[in-house]
Image: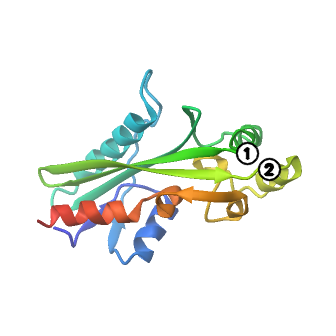
Amino acid sequence: MTGNLVLASQSPRRADLLTNSGYRFTVEPANIDERLHPGESPSDHVARLAGEKARVVAVSHPDALVLGADTMVVVDGDVLGKPESDEVATSMLWRLSGRTHQVLTGVALIGGQRSRCEIASTEVTFRSLRPDEIAWYVDSGEPNGKAGAYAIQGRASRFVTGIVGSYSNVVGLPIALVDTLIRSFAT
């Protein structure tokens, strides 16, 4: 079963992480409603979405291992999703400036009648940012489509002063956790 892996995500970053880690897989994005439910905690949210993505795709791949994932940035208990505008991206970056925040990724794996879901958490610290740096970064377009309005593997790497936990989790997929889950299905 481990030879047939399906990534239930359209994220090019997740695909790159899997490819660079030596996995062979196919991609079939799941189309689900990703809105936060009232009263839902960030960790419950990423776990629910990862599971839903995997379940939706697993229906058409009963003999495969289906991997679903969802990543979010959390600061002061607030979820910073993907910014809808440059103004929202700017506001998010101001909230992260000079602070430590959390990046959570729910990872779900479904194979046959078995399923597992785990959550990875990484702390990321940004140095204090100047208004011109935030404007430069937002103007680059890189914050678009990124949880928390930044990509640690890109230009925003110059803002990061510390990280505790999985770097690949901040990019979008905690590879060591994925490997542990896949290996658990082989036994």
Residue at figure coordinates x 37%, y 78% from the top left: 22
The reply, left or right, for residue 74 in relation to residue 32 is: right
Residue type at mark 2 is: Leu
Q: Residue furthest top?
A: 38
Q: How dense is the environment of label 1, judged by Cα within 10 Å: few (below 14), some, or many (20 and up)? A: some
Quadrant location of residue 63?
A: bottom left
Ranked by sequence position, the earlier of labels 1 and 2 is: 1
Could you say whether the residue bearing mark 1 is in a helix, strand or loop?
A: loop
Q: Nearer the viewer, residue 40 or 16?
A: 40
Q: How does the figure colour the protein chain or chains?
A: rainbow
Residue at figure coordinates x 21%, y 73% from the top left: 3
- Is residue 59 in view from this perspective? no
> Image quadrant for the C terminus?
bottom left
The reply, left or right, for residue 13 in relation to residue 153 is: left
Residue at figure coordinates x 46%, y 62% from the top left: 14
Q: Residue furthest right?
A: 132
Question: Residue 182 placed where, x, y %?
Answer: 24, 64
Q: Name the residue beneath numbered marker 2.
A: 129
- Is residue 6 in view from this perspective? yes
Question: Residue 113 placed where, x, y %?
Answer: 11, 50
Vertical side of 19 occupied by 36: above or below: above
Separation of residues labelled 1 and 2 (CA atoms): 5 Å
Vertical side of 105 occupied by 33: above or below: above
Question: Residue 131 placed where, x, y %?
Answer: 86, 46
> Image quadrant for the N terminus?
bottom left
The reply, left or right, for residue 38 in relation to residue 65 is: right
Answer yes or no: do the residues labelled 1 and 2 have beta carbons within 8 Å? yes
Q: Name the residue beneath numbered marker 1.
A: 97
Question: Residue 77 placed where, x, y %?
Answer: 54, 31
The number of numbered discs placed on residues in the rendered structure image is: 2
Residue type at mark 1 is: Ser
